[in-house]
Image (spheres, rainbow, N blue to C red):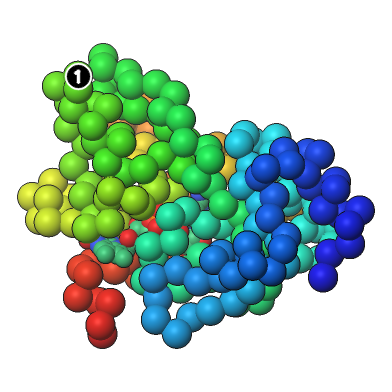
Amino acid sequence: MLTKAVIDHLQQKVGIGNVYHEREDLLVYGYDATPETRGLPDVAVFPVNVEGIKAALAVCREEGLSVTPRGAATGISGGSAPVKGGMALGLTRMNRIIEIDEENLTATAEAGVITVDLFNAVASRGLFYPPDPGSQNVSTLGGNIAENAGGLRGLKYGVTRNYVMALSGLLYDGTEFFTGGKCVKDVAGYSLRDLLVAAKGPSGSSPRRLSA
Ligand SMILES: Cc1cc2nc3c(=O)[nH]c(=O)nc-3n(C[C@H](O)[C@H](O)[C@H](O)COP(=O)(O)OP(=O)(O)OC[C@H]3O[C@@H](n4cnc5c(N)ncnc54)[C@H](O)[C@@H]3O)c2cc1C
């Protein structure tokens, strides 16, 4: 149970409408699409920028809270269910497509962009973003990356991993990281990007998994 002072601090840093702490609000952030996997966060926070994520993680460290990132919660490997309580860190309000670079054939987007929104944005320019999980109308790019999602088009074009060129993010200790880049011939050092893609468990390769 977080104190009012902590909640006030979070609301001040992340925005009053982006922090939920009443039990009736928290219940909906306690599960994803995985059967029988449930938790109850102590707080649910929806930052709208990187500074907000940093502030939220700082509170987790100070209060000793675990943190569970959350996209659209369509995952079927239980990853966004906060089974240890703590903070549900929703990324759905970071949903800007920052750039579509037609010369390099790359797009730069925030984690909370809905998969089909990226597809439509590039399609309007005559381009094609292939990964098409069955959940694409609601799933987020962040969740797609963490689960290495792929749909029927994956048979011909590959899955999310094949379309991630670079990632940036934050570690629990607040360290910001960047890995990869727009250049295809990015060969120096370990490919941390490939460690992060699919890091959150097996992708639900088919809705059939829901009943497995
Ligand atoms: C009806 C249905 C159909 C589906 N069809 C498919 C399919 O065809 N192919 C397929 O591969 N999957 C499918 N899935 C599974 C699911 O949709 C995918 O795994 C999807 O990629 C999850 O995205 P999400 O935004 O809902 O992520 P969430 O479920 O919210 O999160 C999934 C994991 O990613 C982590 N995460 C989310 N965002 C971030 C972030 N920004 N940073 C770090 N970690 C993050 C979460 O902690 C969690 O571990 C389906 C699910 C449903 C319910």
Residue 183 seen anywhere in this rendered image of the structure: no
Which residue is found at the position 84% from the left and 64% from the top?
A: 2
The residue beneath circle 1 is 125
The quadrant of the picture occupied by the C terminus is: bottom left
- Crowdedness near tag 1: few (<14), some (14–19) or many (≥20) residues, C-alpha within 10 Å: few
Q: Going by the picture, which residue comes out furthest to the top? A: 103
Position of 59 with respect to 130 (left or right) is: right
Q: Residue furthest front?
A: 24
Q: Please, is residue 203 above or below residue 84 in the view? A: above
> Residue visible at 34% across and 28% down?
107
State which quarter of the image contains the N terminus: bottom right
Would you say 152 lies left or right of 179 here?
Answer: left
User: Horizontal placement of 150 versus 35: left or right?
Assistant: left
> Percent position (x, y) of residue 128?
17, 32
Please say if 121 is above or below 178: above
**Where is ligand 1, by quadrant?**
bottom left
Where residue 111 appears, x then y in whole percent?
Answer: 47, 42
